[in-house]
Amino acid sequence: MVLLAGMSWGCGEAPAASGEMRAGPATYPYHITTTTGMITDIVRRVAGDLAEVEGIMKEGVDPHLYLPTRGDVAKLSRADVVFYNGLNLEGKMSDVFVRIASAGKPVFPVTEALSETGDYVMTTPLQHFDPHVWMDVRGWIAAVGVVQRKLSGFDPKNASVYESNALAYIDELEKLDEYARESIRSIPQKQRVLITAHDAFNYMGRAYGIRVRGIQGISTESEAGVKDINDLIDLIVNKNIQAVFVETSVSDKNVRALVEGARARGHKVKIGGTLFSDAMGRAGTYEGTYIGMIDHNVTTIVRALGGEAPEKGMQGRLSDVAY
């Protein structure tokens, strides 16, 4: 069990961290606004009935490219607390966060705070931070701890409620982490290669022992060149890889180019399924939760690459179409 009390995560936060010094919200439920669905889900679980949590990015939305609407800015401005990912995931929203934080709003980037742990947050060879921490369930457990501490600082009289909610949720996440670990381990070693539309799965690769290659870089703003695609076709053919994967929030054209390129060289590779990368599934579905998102990804990957996983996933709840 992860111990939440006494955690310190202060590095890299927006200037409005002073919001933790407030006496608490004026009324309940108070209002929290979040960016991505993954953050919305964990904040809801930790806040419970004490807050209404509204996310501004829905299913299928690419946060790398997302431009906030006037309505989004109004929601962020009206909120009592704001949580966002950080590490430049929502790069086109940076000015909005700075402006709101400068006005005294408690604004918290949940993953930048994790950088205080030293080498946890991954970087590219060009030293760009990789923001996709949620792909390692242990990383998202740490993010739950960040949310718990920030809400306890904002609303100290309910700190015990936030801690209790966080610990109950972490217990579920630890089971998810073990499912991912055991299932991916069942993939034959030579087939343990995950090829996707963009580099969103490196934390998963590091955590669960699977080699990861993305056609585009960490941000979907980057463009894949002909050489990038040809290099991956070489890998697919030479390693006899049987499946590649598309993503719900990224165009599938480059992945389909891999399939066609491999076919032209006499190797048949299939699209193994659609993965959730920067956005969760449709609201109201199991895949529209963080646990369901990861369960779907792990189960889809494992079954397509020759491992063993239940058809309906860890909890038997996966749907046929959730995006």
Image (tube, helix red, strand yellow):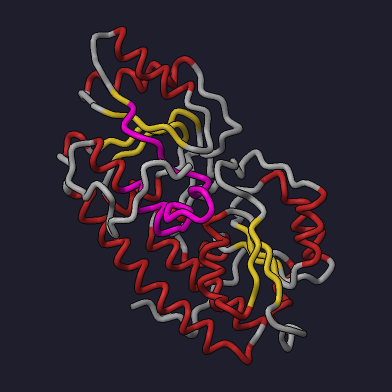
**Residue most extreme to the bottom:** 157
Check residue 64 for magenta coloring. no
Q: Position of residue 284 (x, y in %)?
A: 51, 56
**In the rendered image, the vertical position of residue 188 relative to residue 255, given as above or below:** below
Which residue is at 49% across, 79% downward? 7
Residue segment shown in magenta: 271-298
Q: Residue furthest right?
A: 103
Quarter of image, res 168: bottom left
Residue 158 drawn above or below residue 284: below
| Residue 14 image point, x, y percent | 70, 64
Q: Is residue 133 visible?
A: no
Q: Residue at x 27, y 8 (%)?
A: 265
Report the quarter where the N terminus lies.
bottom left
Going 40% across and 59% down the picture, which residue do you hit? Answer: 291
Q: How many marks?
A: 0
Do we see residue 288 in this rendering?
Answer: yes
Compared with 33, 204 (above or below) is above
> Of residues 165 and 102, which is closer to you in this image?
165
Q: Is residue 43 left or right of residue 267?
A: right
The picture places residue 103, in percent across and down from the top left corner, at: 84, 67
Relative to 236, is 113 on the left or the right?
right
Q: Percent x, y for residue 144?
A: 49, 70
In the image, 291 versus 140, the foreground residue is 291
Q: Is residue 285 magenta?
A: yes
Residue at 57% across / 63% down in the picture? 110
